[in-house]
Amino acid sequence: MNRAQSEALFAEALKFIPGGVNSPVRAFRAVGGHPFFVNRAARAHIWDVDGNEYVDYVGTWGPAILGHAHPKIIAAVKAAADHGTSFGIPNPFEVTMAKLICALVPSVEKVRMCNSGTEACMSAIRLARGFTKRDKIVKFDGCYHGHADSLLVKAGSGALTFGNPDSAGVPADFARHTLVVPFNDPDALRSVFAANAGQIAGVIIEPVPGNAGLYLPRPGFLEFMRKITQANGALLIFDEVMTGFRLAAGGAQERFGIRPDLTCFGKIIGGGLPVGAFGGRADIMDYLAPVGPVYQAGTLSGNPLALAAGLAALEELRSGEAYRKLEGLGAALEAGLVDAAKSAGVPVQFNRCGSMFCGYFTAGPVHNLADAMQSDRERFKRYFHGMLDASVYLAPSQFEAGFISTAHTATDIAKTLSVAAKVLKTL
Ligand code: KE4
């Protein structure tokens, strides 16, 4: 596949941007080779600057749940842009968005908009500490909550991909307040609460972790977390930046019937524009400035273009048809890939939750980070490039999730399965 113009752009990018990318996971470091450059996207397809077309299963890491350049999102952004791009003064979209998030996610009584998932998680942690007057936070190894200092401890996503789950530059003094336990391990959670009685402000979790590939909570694990946090006066924080409005209209918490104290959002609620949000119990949210003592702010928070795009996306998703379609497409992809791997004699553990999925090159089940680390990454590399050269773009790391959109067609799925059947045989 000719990617000469991408190569030229990458050579130029390397001169002016660290690693040639504005976010590390894009650099293809985990799979080898160089990233391609995209200048157009529509529905479930992307085109690179050399004119190559790909079926896209990254979906800009989650926001493109309706596919790319959805007409209603484009129209909403264009209409909003005609009236200005930012005011720094309250605008009506902020009220509409806040009301809609509260309507779709019952645990959210009040919500604050910000500009990224990182900001949302960082602010939720600060709020939990301010509300409980405690310092310690519990997170799970392999879960990624953005790149705020206190959360870059045994983190997933790019941090895990590059083998430095504990980033340089985070003072030990910060990291020591972050306690890390394995996902799906109630005993470890019980021990950490026993050893830190009265000191834990909150537990933050991706209810369905999508930053070490994808694995699911074992039955009862999330319920156990709800109980043990309640019993210890700690807050339960669901990081639904990825799962929010994707796994159900009310996110993973609707799917699993859990009511967290705080929830973090991002991605889908910006329709592809920069966005984040965090919300939850009103008594906790009212600890935020200007009402309460916990400071949090943002020049572009509640930006009219991002909210116009996000509102168009959420209104489209509310129809309910979207989730049935996503489940159907996900089930078809799963069944086909499992069959293809079996016929090729390649051990693959395929995990899926709705329209999020990951195929691990390992025979064993994958329920946590340790299991995920068993995957044969050399095989994944060959699989990734085999699929890419056949015009199917998967996440460029074994430790990322794949995303299906409502714009994926049966033809896209059939093509993906036919390509996978061939590529798996070459591994
Ligand atoms: P952002 O700051 O990238 O908007 O969101 C951080 C974040 C927080 N919580 C969860 C569950 C997330 O998945 C993310 C970001 N996800 C990664 C993909 N695994 C973003 C891709 C990237 O870093 O370029």
Image (cartoon, rainbow, N blue to C red):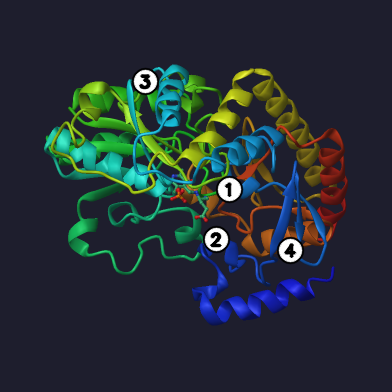
> In the rendered structure, are the residues bearing label 4 and label 2 in contact, judged by CB atoms less than 8 Å apart?
no
Say what secondary structure mark 3 lies in.
loop
x, y (%) of residue 420? 82, 50
C-alpha separation, residue under disc 1 versus residue under disc 3: 25 Å
Who comes first in sequence, dot 4 or dot 2? 2
Mark 4 or 3, which is nearer the eye? 3
Which image quadrant is residue 196 in?
top left
C-alpha separation, residue under disc 1 versus residue under disc 4: 21 Å
x, y (%) of residue 317? 61, 25
Q: Is residue 427 visible?
A: no
> In the rendered structure, are the residues bearing label 1 and label 4 in contact, judged by CB atoms less than 8 Å apart?
no
Foreground residue, 279 or 330? Answer: 279
x, y (%) of residue 69? 69, 42
- Would the CB of label 4 be found within 8 Å of ligand 1? no
Mark 4 or 2, which is nearer the eye? 2
- The type of residue carrying mark 3 is Ser
Q: Most extreme residue toward the front, as rendered?
A: 83
Foreground residue, 1 or 6? Answer: 6
Say what secondary structure mark 2 lies in.
helix
C-alpha separation, residue under disc 4 versus residue under disc 2: 18 Å
Who comes first in sequence, dot 1 or dot 4? 1
Residue 107, disc: 3
Residue designated by label 4: 382
Mark 4 neighbour class, 10 Å CA radius: few under 14, some 14 to 19, many 20 or more? some
- Would the CB of label 2 be found within 8 Å of ligand 1? yes
Who comes first in sequence, dot 3 or dot 2? 2
Residue 316 is left or right of residue 191, and the answer is: right
